[in-house]
Structures are given as structure tokens and as C-alpha cells.
Amino acid sequence: MSAISLGKLTKVYSTGVKALDGLDLDVRDGEFVVLVGPSGCGKTTALRMVAGLETITSGTVAFDGQVVNDVSPRHRDVAMVFQNYALYPHLTVAENIGFALTNKKIPKREREQRVRSAAAALGLSGLLNRRPAQLSGGQRQRVAMGRAIVREPSVFLMDEPLSNLDAKLRVQMRSEVLRVHKAIGAATLYVTHDQVEAMTMGDRVAVLHDGVLQQYATPRELYDRPANLFVAEFIGSPEMNLYEASVAGGELVLGSQRLALGPAEAVLAPYRGQKVIAGVRPEDLRLGGAGRADQAAGAALTADVRVVEMLGSEKHAFFAIDAAAAGASALAAAAGEAEADAGLLAEQAHNGMARLDPRSAVRPGQRVTFGVDPRRLHFFDPGTGLAIR
Amino acid sequence: MSAPPLSAPPPARPRAQTRRERRRRERLERQDAAIPVELYGLRRGTLTALTACCVLFAVFILAPVVWVIINSTKTQANIFESFGFWFAAPFEFFHTFANLFRDVDGDGTYSQWFLNTVLYSVSGGIGATVLAALGGYGFARFEFRGSKVFFAVIIAGLLVPITLIAVPLYLAYAKVHLINSIWGMILPSMVSPVGLYLMRTYVELSIPRELTDAARIDGASEPRIFFRIALPLMVPGVMTVLLLSVAGTWNNYILPLIIFSDNNLYPVTVGMGLWSQHASNSGDANLYPLIVMGGLVTIIPMIALFALLQRYWRGGLLLGSVAN
């Protein structure tokens, strides 16, 4: 039985805005599930509905099979960490952490003991008598976590708990949150807009867009087999390169170039003679990996390198090929958002990016050939945006 | 944002020292925060003109107070004959002060009236503050059927001057036996639309919703959320409302004038009005020094209260609660 299960959960605000549209989601006991999506996708609304802080337009929220739609947040026994921590400013750290226990009328002795051990687990032992104003951002974040874990909840909700920390601390707290999760073993629903957090932390990740669930799968699955164009673009940084292409005689026509389809040929059979959107991740383009044999087999892509960025651990080569870019960023560019850039950088305009070894000798202005493994290509229906599998 | 230290806290310092340091730091921070007028696009001359306006306004407000202080030292003859803004012998201050608490003409005594005023103001003021805090929090945090209409009606109450409803008020009071009853004075003083409005705005602006949400998730009941979480954070607003409603009742003249005919129930305002009437009718009872002295004694508690509560105006209560 799943610890949290959402059935056709829908939220329509009185303004008519549909924040969440029929969300189905199951979180198993002890599982860490990340809800991810761009801002305004409904992920926080969903979390607040699970907590009971938002009324449910339709659908159900159930814990351990019990529908809790009409249970007040006070009696749902969920713990929640808020984005801005929401610490009680006039109470000390110990009082903040112990507040839920005093509400439960837990005897003072046990309460103090539990507060102390929660504080110890989070490295807050020396700060118990301080007030939130006297703490750093990271310490406040820990207090917010402490307030949640001290209750030993069976359902743990987190609303972008790391987004107010600086980059370095965020990385550090990521593993700390996971450690705490492992220790208490509660079913956790974690909301973030940061796909890196989603990928690194989630046992499973639910990608939301415009209130609709796009895909619910493990991080590996999301990355390797995105269900649609949105997931393909949203997961992965740098983004997947997407192009308009067509299928002709067992080959993929990409502008003036042709790529062998290999094993994908059978899947794409219904699309013969039609347009598809083809995608390849920046790291799946191998420089110099295109031997003569590859090229003969048509598994190579010739491109003009425009800009090269050296990141130390890797090199990003921005290139242009004569196929039209597809996907949301391309659409935005077409809509004129990138117009200013376009005029200035017309000659430098690029529509693709490869992630290369930092020692590769690639220079702007160069014409290069990338080796492409046909098995690493992704195909999407241009009409529906769904993956072709 | 720099990486916050995660190491152990510095050792605690003696309390007095940290308080002094905090004061000093606050003062320095205020200095740093002050923006030179040039940055607002103002010229120095403009600033001087604005300051002059402020000074003029202050003089306008303070002149009567100064007059009262000076003339509380004079005899009745000197109040009328000497220059109003300077002292004139003999110095009668203590003599008048002592006389103030005698019964004059059997009208009742100043001390009785003063105690009445204190009673009405304190009970009315505290009652108004409690109701405004509860109501303001409720209107700020809960949506219920008709909440908008209720609030609109309460605010509309602000617009009705009491002089307009004097007659219906008297008739209504007569029906429920509130004429010549202290409750007739206290109960209406406990209703403060301004206070309610202030509290609602204060709660909306200064208590983040996440805080009450967090308390709800932590399993606190609504009364407990109010008393343990919201109320401590509402203190500056509560103090403002307390001061306003106490002062409002303290200075109220028209309501007690309508409902009291028994001299012993008068507050200072109405009692002094009675003296003033007698003084202009008879002219001989040496009442004017008493009226001036009474006015002086009456404003002192209000000034003291203001000075006392002023420190609650300081912000910063929510520091560290939520990240922004």
C-alpha cells in the first residue's frame, strides 16, 4: 500500500485558473519522490493540497489508503519544510523544534530529549537557545528540518527547502536531506524547480508542466527515455539538441544530411515520409569518434563550430547545422524573444551544442564531424510531442 | 550571500554588554541607512524650507500646551491680564494644584472625575484592543461567508460621526438602561473600527501566512496559533491600537455628555466643561486657574503613556523568521 496516493487531484482557483489537472501519483513507504517543473506548474499547489493547506477542487489525497480530503492539516500528521523556513521568530531554536511536541502534549522530559536528539542529528546542539534571527541561512534551514523530523512523521513534505541557500551550501544540504530521509524512512514528497536536485535526490521523479503530469519515473528513465518533448528539454543540463527532421527510406533526413536510423527504423516505420522531431543529448555527440566506417554507415553529423566554452572539466562546443531547431527554446526564438541577439550574432548563430572532452582541440570556425550512435537518438511526434518508441 | 558559518557559536557574552552593543549598532546602522538629500533630487534650500514648515507646524501644535503650562502658575487675574506666554508673579502653581482636588461648588471633584476617566479609558481601551486584535486577526486570516460585507460595514462605521447619532443613541440607551451607567460609557468604547482595521492590516503585512500554516501543520489548534504564534508578533500593532483607543476614550467628550447626568459619573472632559460653564456664568469663583491646572493634569498621563509605549513601534520583530 502506498503511503501517499493522489487520485485525479485537481485544483481550480476561483479566478478560473487551473493549477493542477488530474494528478495521479503514488509514493511508497520510505520512498523519496521529487515533484519538479518550471515555476507555475502546480507543484507547490499539489504539495499544499497534500498538507491540507489548500482546498481540493476534485480528486483525492490518501495516506495509507485512508482518504484525508476532509481532515484538517492539524490532524493529518504530516511534517512540512517550507521554502522560506517559516520559523517562529519569537521562539528559541529548541521551542521551534519542540512546538509540534508541545501541541501533542508530550511530557516535558520526553520532549526535551527528542528535541536534543533531533538537534544533534542536524548539528544544532549548540544553538538551542538562540532565536532564528541569530542564525545563518543554513542553520535556519536545519531548524526547519529539525522541526519536521522531531515528530517522526510518516509523511514528510518539503517545498523547495534548499532554494534560499547559496550554491555551495545547497549541494551540501542535498546529501544531508537524503541522510535524514534515510534515517527516518518516511514517505517524502519533495518539490523543486531545480532539475539537478530532482535527478540527484529522487527515487522517482514526477515532472509537472501546466498542472499536468508529464512523466513519473526514475531519474535514469527520465533521462534516457523522456516521454515527451517537454521532459526531454526540461531534464538534462545542458539541454538536449532538438531538430525538425523527416524519415525517408530508413534514414533520418536532417537538413542536407542523412543519418542511418539503425534499430530505430522499425519504430519509425509509421512515420516514413513524414516529419519527426529528432533529439540528441550534447554528450552523445562524439568528436572524432566518427571513423570512416561510421561515416559510411551514415552515423555522423557534420557541423560548423561557432563558439567554444571551456569549463575546465568539459568543453561546450556550440555549432550550427542546416536543420531547423525544434522545441520550446526554438519556438521562443522564432517568436522574437531572441531577435536582438539574432541581428548581432547572425553569423555566429548556432542551433546545437556538444559536450566534449576538455582536451579536444576544437576551435570556432572549424567544420567538424560528430559521431552519433543511432541508439542514442530520441524521436518525438511533431504534432503531439510524444516520444516515438 | 556569503557562506554562513556552520561552526559552533561564539561564547555567550554578558547581557548588559550585548544590549549596549546592540543599541550602538542600531544607531550606527541608522546613520548608514540615512540617504543624503541630494540623492532624492532635493536641493539644500528645499530641505531648509521643508524643515521650516515642520517647525511651524510643531509650534502650532505645541503653543497651547506651552500656554497651559505657563498659565497653570498664575492667579485668575493674571491669566487674563498678563502676557499669555510668560510667567507673572505670584507663583500659584502648588496652591492651585492642591485646590484642584477640592470639591468646588458641590459639582463634584476633579479627583472623582479623574478616576472615572482612568476607569473608562483603561477598561474601554483594553477591551477595544482585545476585540480589535481578535477581530483583525480573524478578518486577515479567515475567509468566511459574508466576511467582506461584515468588514465593509465595520469600516463604514468609521464614517458616522457620533454627533449625528446622538439623539437615537440616547433613546436606545434609555431603553436598555445604560443612561447614567458606567457600562454606557465603557461598552461603546470597546468598539474600535479603526483599531480593527489597523490590526487587520498589521496582521496581513507582518505575519507571513507560512507561519500560521506551519503552526497548523505542527498540530496547533487555532486558539493556540493565535495566542502562541500570532499574538506575540502582533505586539507593535496591539500597542498602537491600545494607545489610540485609550486616548480616544480619555479625550471623549460627546458620549459622556449625552449619557451622564450624574456629576459623580463624569469623566474629566465633561467635568471641566461644567466648571468652564460655571466660570463664564458667575466669573467670581476663581475657577479659571483650576480649569487650566485640570487641563494640564489631564494631558500628562497621555504623554506618559505615549512615551512608554513608543518603544514598541520599533520593527524587526520578525527578523529571521522567513528568508526573503
Image (cartoon, rainbow, N blue to C red):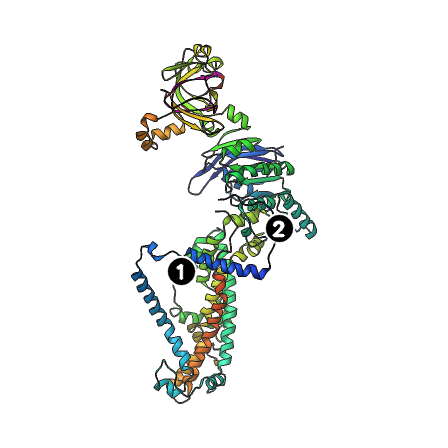
Is residue A307 or residue A114 the one in the foreground? A307
Q: Residue beneath label 2, please?
A: A128
Amino acid type indicated by mark 2: Leu
Mark 1: few, some, or many residues within 10 Å (few <14, many ≥20)?
Answer: few
3D distance between C-alphas at marks 2 and 1: 48 Å
Q: In this view, does B223 lie to the left or right of B62?
A: right
Q: Pinpoint the chain carrying mark 2.
A: A
Please state, as top left, top right, bottom left or bottom right, where the N terminus of chain A lies in the image.
top right
Q: Pinpoint the chain carrying mark 1.
A: B
The reply to whether the magenta stretch includes residue B227 is: no
Q: Residue beneath label 1, please?
A: B156
Q: Is residue A59 above or below residue B263?
A: above
Residue A346 picture location, percent across and down: 32, 27
Amino acid type indicated by mark 1: Ala
Residues shaded magenta? A351-374
Please tell me whether mark 2 sits on a helix, a strand or a loop. loop
Residue found farthest to the bottom:
B284
Q: Is residue B301 left or right of residue A366?
A: right
Q: Residue A117 carries which label?
A: none
Q: Is residue A57 visible?
A: no
